[in-house]
């Protein structure tokens, strides 16, 4: 339906373009050089004012139509129907009405619901026709207003360019809108979560068991939302990842920038960067398929019991994924240290190793630290590896051979499959998402700040 | 092209004359510290030095002058094997320090550079504290056996570089926070902290203002009592002020070398004369 | 000449001293150590990449072949009504066709076992074929039918027909007994020569097995019973019972008995490795399968179904067509949104935007969005696109929208870099002949920057192709058994989410499929990146 309307608008715009162009040419009797703007600008100007407002109207309309009809529907119900119902029950009633309207009838719907379903269908039809009429009106209005302005002296190019600039600004604003969307959606859902669960419990509680009764009367634990074990697990796995990635990444960057023959460097660097291009779901499977069994059988031979989904295996694989981050940031940072520092050190009779460890690394430290912070943020936010290779049960432990869970694992497991929006379990995922977003944002801002400061220092 | 064709016979005629004069100087008052014989150097395919032979004497300042790109900086970097670090750099010839070939297989560039220190065109203090900058050399070479010995070396080096009075209260502050002239004196302090025998200075004043330049020049005056100093400079006035001997490089060749006063008053080569009188350069 | 300097000059280090030489050696050793660490680090990184690729190729390669039986099938008109062939009893037809080729199984249980050689989808394969070729009803047709996963792997040699009957502990335990001379052999049969206490209480209750176990335990006190009692043959207690019956006087005494060992240990005593049939197969199945192989009906051709079939619960029938289609739709939406929006935003920011708070804010936002965890974009899509706008769950449209938000920063950054690389002289030339700023950019700058923009876009699309977490959150991991119903608004799955679902499946055959799916995904990524590199080379321009 929407697709056809959009297509129709496109067609209208095209027709307007042709008419506008033709009228512009006609207005000067074919002597195009008498026009201020080229005929195509006139056409484009008309088409833009026909098409863009109409499309915007459609978008606004479909956003508002659903909520408005819902509200009307509730008002139209016989007095007292919704008395004593909470938000969730009202939602259920609405979805029942809608499914009856769609022809999926389960059991015996009440008369009230059947009536409402009928009204719902009727209003939907009205709304749809109203939209078509409104869109046509807007398009026509645009056409009439702009078409009237076509004249030899009309500055259609300026008008078109203003429209174009406006569109470009709108596109640029999408970045802000996205951030706004992230912050608002996380905040709203998280606040709804904190209405049900106290923030104190969430941030300081030691017990994370988000399972709550799905059906009434189902016997489970009450659902507790103390996120400390989840945070601790995230930190443990990220820490293991860093233990793997930092030395490997840093030492290989040192070797590649300072020791390696340029030809070796030109071969090894792209190979290392391949590691960064591999999708994380592949690493996750690699962890499950190869690393975890290997770690486990190694544990068996030395006599340490290692869980199949140990924090170590997940963290180690995450570390492999992060190696290229660390190495390319360290590489940039070391390479950015001016040659004069190296000369100064060599001239003092320092060996290459001394020059690296005593002069280059301290000088490059801010850049390297920035890279490490970005990598930490990346590790904390990494999802697929841990979803596949880490645990689901939240245990508070520092033993890397036991399974732990992470923030991202919980977000995915709480939200995967069917869910309703009014359930603390679902909302908890958004609260975790908010924490994740804020923490990674802070890390990124600090890291980018450090890196920028560092670059300025040597520029 | 014309000059080049002409140049060949002149150098050939000149060479023995130069040597003779050098010998005379040595006998007079100073020991011979470094000798270079027939040094040729290539960066990849491009030859940068052609048959350079030069004697450098202890406890005096030898200035290398010449127009930019003449090879004087390249030559000074051969004296402590700093060119080793550059990819694709080849060197042929014989350079000796106290009669020992510094390009011999058993010579360790690390040791050599501790004996032949260097100060660069642009001050390049490490991004560390003033103290750490000076302590760097003694630390890596293990010159101090205790903290107090190290303190002593740092203070003495800063004193000899004439910087101590200005920085004694802020030794732990970053060396990069000093003014340009102070930074350069810090680099000199750093270079002499390991007691080198020869001090190479590659246009040490070109990035400095006249007042800082004057300070460095008077510092050189003092340092030459202890060290053998080789300075590259593009300023003939500076060469005249600070050096006892001057060597003139042109297009990768050593054109003329001799007593500074003689060089500036009575050069034997026309090109030297042209350069000194400002006809090119 | 000052005093200080003379003294200092003499105090210079003696480089020839042994201490100095030792120190130099140590310093060079430290330098070499650092180099070695570097080489080890690079070796580890490259080696791990190598292990990753090899393990994926090793496990994934078999999935590119599929073992099939070329089954001759009689499409019996009595079982398939030509008027309504879809309702035919194809299960029976397949069964009959199979039993015609193998030694007839007897019991119903055996029959079920033998039919399990073929994929559970066999009836549907035949049905689809007959529906497509109704003229074959009443005729004999030969069509290749995939075998079920265990037999697929058996034929490819991924899993063995027989496995070692004894584990390492069991073999070693028996070795210990042999070394102690407890194992004796008469007439090619091995016995354990043990001291057994004939416990009167056990004789009373007839528990001769207990006596046998007790006597063996006395020799191996540190071994668990499960690893050890299997050593005794089933008739071992009878040997004790026989002794007690022939000589009741031994009750209450300790006597020496020779107990026969069980079958696998008999083999082991001969110095051979005892083997048993893999538990995944029954003897009837193996017999039937061998018969099929002997008749030359079994082959494993290239597995086109991997690309043509959609998902299935049976690994041997599961393919990637649904996932590839889903990924294609999502990437298409992602491209249609992010390419024009990204270019517009970049052009505005690079060419038109005044330097003010708003543009600063936009820049900061773009840089930060590039580093926001992908799962957060999933939450955004869930809350805004599904929750607020009410778009359909699992749809490629939503997936593409979420992915486009993630690709936007990449495209914007790449486009700005490409625009920056166009020299001002081009702009000045165009402005100089009276073009407006918009015309300069549309007609001159953008076309020149296009290769760079496209390269950035392809790289962004490649990243989007590998993204999994946001798609999981908006439900784009639906089970899609058929490609036909797919659309931009219909539930779908994508390549990475398909990998995730398969990796999660318990059936063994999915391990191989998952690796194969990963290889396919990596193949697409390599192609996209090569296209980007080729584009960059083709249009590389020195200004």
Image (tube, grey):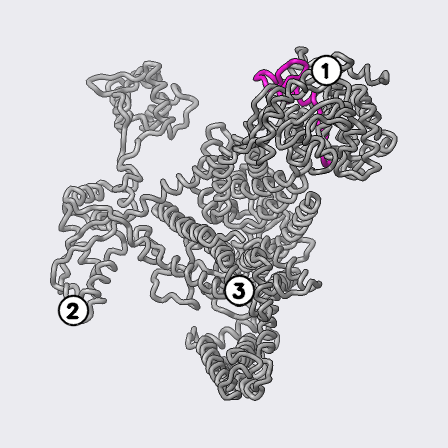
In front: mark 2 or mark 3? 3
Q: Nearer the viewer, mark 1 or mark 2?
A: 1
Residue nearest the observer in this picture, B261 or A262: B261
Vertical position of residue A311 compared to residue A356: above or below: below
- Chain letter of the residue beneath label 2 in the structure image: C
Q: Residue furthest left?
A: C139
Task: Name the side, left or right, on which C352 lies relative to A100.
Answer: right
Q: Position of residue A48 (x, y in %)?
A: 54, 78
SS under mark 1: loop
Residue C444 bears which disc, if any?
Answer: 3
Is residue B54 toward the left or the right of residue C462 in the image? right
Is A379 placed above or below C489 here? above
Question: Which span of residues is magenta-colored?
Answer: B95-122
- B263 shown above or below C110: above
Instruction: Tell me the residue that label 1 is attached to.
Output: C13
Task: Provide the residue designation for mark 2.
Answer: C82
Viewer-closest of C215 and B125: B125
Measure how far apart labels 2 and 3 are at the Cα level. 67 Å
């Amino acid at each position: 339906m929407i697709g056809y309307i959009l297509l129709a608008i496109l067609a209208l715009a095209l027709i307007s373009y042709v008419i506008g162009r033709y009228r512009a040419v006609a207005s000067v009797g074919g002597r195009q050089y008498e026009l201020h703007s080229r005929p195509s600008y006139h056409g484009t100007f008309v088409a833009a004012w026909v098409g863009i407002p109409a499309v915007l109207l459609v978008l606004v309309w479909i956003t508002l139509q659903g909520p408005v009809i819902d509200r009307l529907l509730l008002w139209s119900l016989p007095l007292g129907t919704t008395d004593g119902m909470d938000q969730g029950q009202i939602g259920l009633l609405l979805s029942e009405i809608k499914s009856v309207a769609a022809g999926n009838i389960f059991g015996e719907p009440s008369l009230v619901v059947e009536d409402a379903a009928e009204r719902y269908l009727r209003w939907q039809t009205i709304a749809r026709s109203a939209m078509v009429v409104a869109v046509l009106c807007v398009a026509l209005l645009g056409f009439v207003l702009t078409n009237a302005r076509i004249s030899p002296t009309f500055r259609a190019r300026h008008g078109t360019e203003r429209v174009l600039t406006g569109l470009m600004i709108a596109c640029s604003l999408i970045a802000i809108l996205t951030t706004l969307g992230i912050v608002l959606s996380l905040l709203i859902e998280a606040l709804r979560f904190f209405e049900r669960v106290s923030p104190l419990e969430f941030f300081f509680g030691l017990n994370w068991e988000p399972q709550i009764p799905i059906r009434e009367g189902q016997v489970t634990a009450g659902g507790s939302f103390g996120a400390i074990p989840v945070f601790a697990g995230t930190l443990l796995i990220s820490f293991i990842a860093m233990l793997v990635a930092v030395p490997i990444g840093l030492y290989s960057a040192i070797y590649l920038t300072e020791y390696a023959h340029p030809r070796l460097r030109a071969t090894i660097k792209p190979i290392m960067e391949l590691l960064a291009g591999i999708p994380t779901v592949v690493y996750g499977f690699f962890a499950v398929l190869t690393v975890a069994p290997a770690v486990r059988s190694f544990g068996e031979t030395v006599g340490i019991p290692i869980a199949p989904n140990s924090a170590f295996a997940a963290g180690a694989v995450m570390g492999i994924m992060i190696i290229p981050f660390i190495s390319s940031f360290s590489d940039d940072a070391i390479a950015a240290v001016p040659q004069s520092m190296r000369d100064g050190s060599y001239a003092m009779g320092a060996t290459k190793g001394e020059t690296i460890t005593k002069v280059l690394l301290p000088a490059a430290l801010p850049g390297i630290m920035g890279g490490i912070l970005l990598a930490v943020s990346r590790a904390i936010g990494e999802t697929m590896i841990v979803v596949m290779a880490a645990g689901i049960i939240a245990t508070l432990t520092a033993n890397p051979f036991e399974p732990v869970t992470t923030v991202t694992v919980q977000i995915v497991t709480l939200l995967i499959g069917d869910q309703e929006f009014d359930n603390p379990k679902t909302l908890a995922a958004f609260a975790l998402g908010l924490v994740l977003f804020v923490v990674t944002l802070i890390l990124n801002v600090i890291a980018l700040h450090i890196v920028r400061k560092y670059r300025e220092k040597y520029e | 092209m014309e000059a080049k064709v002409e140049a060949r016979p002149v150098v050939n005629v000149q060479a023995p004359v130069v040597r003779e004069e050098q010998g005379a100087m040595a006998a007079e008052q100073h020991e011979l510290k470094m000798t270079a014989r027939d040094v040729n150097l290539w960066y990849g395919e491009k030859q940068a030095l052609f048959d350079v032979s030069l004697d450098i004497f202890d406890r005096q300042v030898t200035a290398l002058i010449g127009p930019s790109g003449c090879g004087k900086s390249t030559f000074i970097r051969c004296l402590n094997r700093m060119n080793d670090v550059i990819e694709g750099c080849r060197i042929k010839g014989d350079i000796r320090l106290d009669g020992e070939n510094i390009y011999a297989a058993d010579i360790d560039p690390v040791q050599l550079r501790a004996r032949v220190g260097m100060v660069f065109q642009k001050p390049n203090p490490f991004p560390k504290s003033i103290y750490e900058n000076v302590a760097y050399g003694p630390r890596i070479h293990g010159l101090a056996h205790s903290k107090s010995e190290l303190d002593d070396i740092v203070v003495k080096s800063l004193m000899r570089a004439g910087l101590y009075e200005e920085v004694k209260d802020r030794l732990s502050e970053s060396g990069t926070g000093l003014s340009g002239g102070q930074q350069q004196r810090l680099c000199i302090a750093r270079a002499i902290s390991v007691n080198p025998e020869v001090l190479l200075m590659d246009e040490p004043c070109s990035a400095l203002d006249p007042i800082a330049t004057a300070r460095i020049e008077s510092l050189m005056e003092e340092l030459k009592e202890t060290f053998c100093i080789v300075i590259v400079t593009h300023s003939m006035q500076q060469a005249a002020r600070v050096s006892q001997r001057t060597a003139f490089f042109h297009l990768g060749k050593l054109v003329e070398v001799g007593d500074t006063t003689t060089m500036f008053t009575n050069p034997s080569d026309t090109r030297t004369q042209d350069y000194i009188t400002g006809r090119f350069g | 000449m000052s005093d200080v300097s003379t003294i200092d000059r003499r105090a210079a280090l003696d480089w020839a001293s042994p201490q100095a030489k030792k120190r130099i050696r140590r310093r060079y050793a430290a330098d070499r150590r650092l180099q070695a660490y570097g080489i080890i680090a690079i070796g580890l990184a490259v080696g791990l990449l190598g292990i990753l690729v090899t393990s994926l190729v090793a496990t994934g390669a078999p999935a590119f072949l599929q073992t099939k039986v070329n089954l001759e099938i009689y499409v019996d008109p009595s079982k398939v009504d030509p008027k309504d062939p879809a309702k035919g009893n194809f299960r029976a037809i397949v069964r009959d066709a199979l039993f015609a080729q193998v030694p007839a199984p007897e019991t119903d249980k055996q029959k079920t076992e033998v039919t399990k050689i073929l994929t559970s989808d066999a009836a549907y394969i035949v049905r689809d074929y007959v529906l497509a070729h109704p003229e074959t009803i009443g005729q004999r047709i030969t069509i290749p039918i995939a075998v079920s996963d265990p037999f697929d792997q058996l034929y490819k040699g991924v899993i063995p027909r027989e496995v070692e009957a004894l584990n390492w502990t069991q073999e070693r335990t028996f070795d210990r007994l042999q070394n102690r001379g407890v194992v004796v052999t008469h007439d090619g049969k091995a016995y354990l020569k043990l001291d057994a206490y004939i416990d009167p209480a056990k004789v009373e209750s007839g528990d001769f097995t207990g006596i046998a176990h007790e006597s063996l335990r006395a020799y191996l006190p540190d071994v668990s019973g499960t690893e050890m009692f299997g050593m005794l043959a089933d008739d071992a207690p009878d040997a004790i019972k026989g002794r007690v019956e022939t000589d009741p006087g031994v009750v209450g005494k300790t006597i020496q008995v020779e107990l026969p060992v069980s079958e696998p240990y008999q083999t082991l005593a001969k110095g051979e490795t005892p083997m048993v049939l893999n538990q995944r197969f029954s003897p009837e199945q193996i017999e039937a399968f061998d018969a099929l192989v002997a008749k030359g009906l079994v082959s494993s051709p290239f597995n086109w179904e991997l690309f043509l079939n959609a998902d299935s619960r049976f690994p041997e029938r599961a393919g990637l067509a649904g996932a590839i289609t889903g990924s294609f739709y999502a990437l298409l939406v992602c491209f249609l949104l992010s390419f024009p929006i990204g270019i517009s935003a970049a052009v505005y920011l690079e060419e038109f935007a005044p330097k003010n708070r708003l543009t600063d804010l936009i820049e900061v936002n773009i840089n930060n969005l590039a580093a926001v965890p992908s799962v957060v974009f999933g939450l955004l899509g869930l809350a805004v696109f599904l929750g607020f706008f009410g778009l359909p769950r699992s749809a490629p449209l939503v997936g593409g929208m979420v992915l486009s938000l993630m690709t936007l920063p990449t495209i914007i950054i790449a486009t700005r870099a490409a625009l920056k690389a166009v020299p001002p002289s081009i702009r000045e030339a165009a402005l100089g002949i009276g073009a407006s700023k918009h015309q300069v950019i549309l007609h001159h700058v953008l076309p020149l920057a296009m290769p760079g923009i496209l390269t950035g876009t392809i790289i962004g699309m490649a990243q989007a192709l590998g993204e999994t977490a946001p798609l999981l959150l908006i439900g784009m991991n639906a089970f899609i058994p058929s490609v036909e119903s797919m659309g931009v608004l219909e539930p779908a799955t994508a390549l990475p989410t398909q990998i995730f679902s398969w990796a999660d499946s318990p059936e063994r055959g999915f391990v191989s499929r998952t690796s194969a799916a990963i290889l396919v995904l990596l193949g697409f990524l390599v192609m996209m990146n090569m296209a980007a590199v080729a584009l960059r080379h083709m249009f590389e321009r020195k200004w």
